[in-house]
Image (cartoon, rainbow, N blue to C red):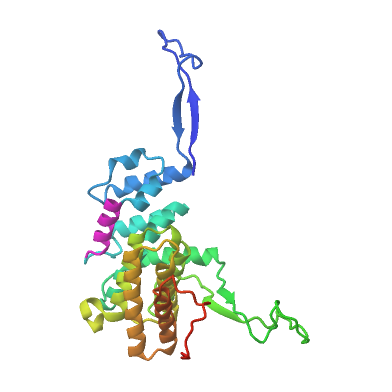
Amino acid sequence: MSNETTTTTTTPATGDQEPDQSTTPNKPHITWSDSNTKAHVAIQSLTSILPNIPSSFSSSETPASCLLHDPSTAEQISKLLRHPTSGAGDNNLCRWLYDTFQSSEPELHLVVLKFLPIIAGVYLSHVNLHKPLAGFEAVLLALYAHETTTRNGQAVTVNIPDLSHSSIYHETNKAAKNSATELNLAVISPSLEPYGAVRSMKRAQIVGVALHLYYSKIPQIPVESKLDFCEFCKVWSSGENGDVKRRINLPWELLQPMLRILGHCLMGHKKDEQLYESAIGAVGCLYDRALHDLNTKAMLATGSLLQLVKLGSESDDVDYTEITESNTITL
């Protein structure tokens, strides 16, 4: 994002004479872009909610980036979201998050998505306590509505290779099949319908779609947010502080985006050691949960991630093409 910069020149005026704007040294004049204006409005609104907003935000040329990456601001927001009274319909912070996301600015979207793990984590962990959580639900519905509009309600699918189709790298005498009618499609996220409220039967889908949106932007999300996500994966699978009554249901529409996010945390191109270890712990908890629930689909998915972790931990110095001199055959 760039700001428009114009230069003007002035000379001291005498009496009522207008200044001559052609003879004084150049002085830059910054005109904020519309994106930066919206970010500054968001920051100004946040000052009435948080006790300490860095003064540098008001003069920054990248205010949205400051909101996204400033650790002190993130800590204050996280603390408020985790407060026992958070999430109510009249909660000022939830209203700020909702309004900030509705600004339609991609950089401000990232600011809100950064706190999605805490929003979804606290919401799902407390939803069975029958507390009013309309504030959290409004934010989740805003994310869901955005994704519904972006995708035009369509499902997200991928084409899976089919071994019954001939490979393009091999000759074959078989007649080519009509791939247009025999596609092997896997649904990553189902088709979406607009919702104006969070119903219990649709809760997992709404949160799952929000997590899909989070995953689509995950390379731009700060590491601290991903650590929060790993923390709540453990809570969702094992219960808060070991309380199994606080475990939540993990249907596939919720579990699948969780595993996609954890896969990024495990195999992202910029590996963070703390995030890597936290993601391993989260996947391990989800695997134990799958075993407990006898959920074969979840067992296969989480077990595959753990197997990738095991393979990745092997030494990079091993040359698997080297033929060892041994009379022992290892299977």
Q: Which residue is drawn at 35% across and 80% down?
A: 286
Q: Is residue 247 magenta?
A: no
Indicate the position of residue 241 as horizontal and vertical percent values: 21, 77
Q: Residue at x 42, y 75 (%)?
A: 259
The answer to whether residue 113 is visible is: yes
Q: Residue at x 21, y 67 (%)?
A: 84
The answer to whether residue 135 is visible is: no
Main structural element of the magenta stretch: helix, strand or loop? helix
> 210 and 237: which one is in front?
237
> From the viewer's perspective, is 246 left or right of 321?
left
- Residue 86, located in which quarter of the rendered image? bottom left
Q: Would you place residue 270 above or below residue 255 in this image?
A: above
> From the viewer's perspective, is 229 left or right of 22?
left
> 22 and 328: which one is in front?
328
Q: Would you place residue 86 above or below residue 247 in this image?
A: above
Indicate the position of residue 149 as horizontal and vertical percent values: 53, 64
> From the viewer's perspective, is 41 left or right of 158?
left
Q: Give the range drawn in magenta.
A: 71-83
Q: Residue furthest top?
A: 14
> 236 and 80: which one is in front?
236
Indicate the position of residue 301 as horizontal and vertical percent values: 44, 82
Indicate the position of residue 91 as horizontal and vertical percent values: 28, 60
Q: Would you place residue 315 above or below residue 34 in this image?
A: below
Q: What is the tally of numbered marks visible in this picture? A: 0
